Image (cartoon, rainbow, N blue to C red):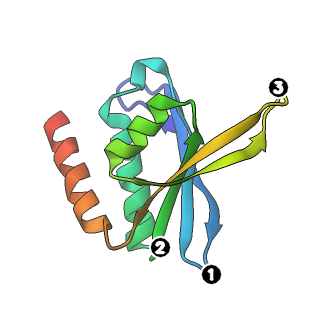
């Protein structure tokens, strides 16, 4: 759960999921934000905290992000974090409308983390 410090209101959610400790991988997902908080530094700050924990505490070798092919805003937000697109899983899941969804998979790997971290810190410093 993501809470706005100033108002104390719940403005979104983001979390770890699909952790694979044997292969040192974790996914960051189930992310949503109120329209008023989208494209703010809040997502960057939350992802910075999760990525720091994943790479520096859990010793992950890769952190994955997934989104629907048609969710352009999410795809752009993931790319802005510094994640690279790995693939598109075509006909990956059937939705409630019985249509299949294509899922776009992104990741950040441990070797990229120092540069990604520096970039995220720079972005956060510009907003403070």
Residue 85 in percent (x, y) is at 45, 52
Reply above or below: 84 against 54. Answer: above
Residue 97: assigned label? 3
In this view, the residue farthest toward the top is 36
Q: Position of residue 19 (x, y in %)?
A: 62, 66
Vertical comparison of 13 with 113: above or below: above
Q: Quadrant of the N terminus?
A: top right
**Does label 1 or label 2 sit earlier along the sequence?**
1
Q: Residue at x 36, y 36 (%)?
A: 42
Q: Which residue is mark 2?
A: 60
In this view, the residue in front, 3 or 73, is 73
Question: From mark 2 to mark 3, how far is it between C-alphas?
Answer: 36 Å
Q: Position of residue 93 (x, y in %)?
A: 76, 44
Q: Residue at x 67, y 46 (%)?
A: 90
- In terms of sequence position, does the residue under pointer 1 or pointer 3 come before the other? 1
The residue at which mark 1 appears reads as 22
Cβ–Cβ below 8 Å for labels 2 and 3?
no
Of tags 2 and 3, the one toward the viewer is 3
Q: Farthest residue to the front: give it.
A: 90
Badge 2: how crowded within 10 Å, few (<14), some, or many (20+)? many
Q: Image check: 76 left or right of 113?
A: right
Q: Give x and y (percent) for residue 71.
A: 54, 31
Look at the numbered disc 1 and give the secondary structure of its residue.
Answer: loop
């Amino acid at each position: 759960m993501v809470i706005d410090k100033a108002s104390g209101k719940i403005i979104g959610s983001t979390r770890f999921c699909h952790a694979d400790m044997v292969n040192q991988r974790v996914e960051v997902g189930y992310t949503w934000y109120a329209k008023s908080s989208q494209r703010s530094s809040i997502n960057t700050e939350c992802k910075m905290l999760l990525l720091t924990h994943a790479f520096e505490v859990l010793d992950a070798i890769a952190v994955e992000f997934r989104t629907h092919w048609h969710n352009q805003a999410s795809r752009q937000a993931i790319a802005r974090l510094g994640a690279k697109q790995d693939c598109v899983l075509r006909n990956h899941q059937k939705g409630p409308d019985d249509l299949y969804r294509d899922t776009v998979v992104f990741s950040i790997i441990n070797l990229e983390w120092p540069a990604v971290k520096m970039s995220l810190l720079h972005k956060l410093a510009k907003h403070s």
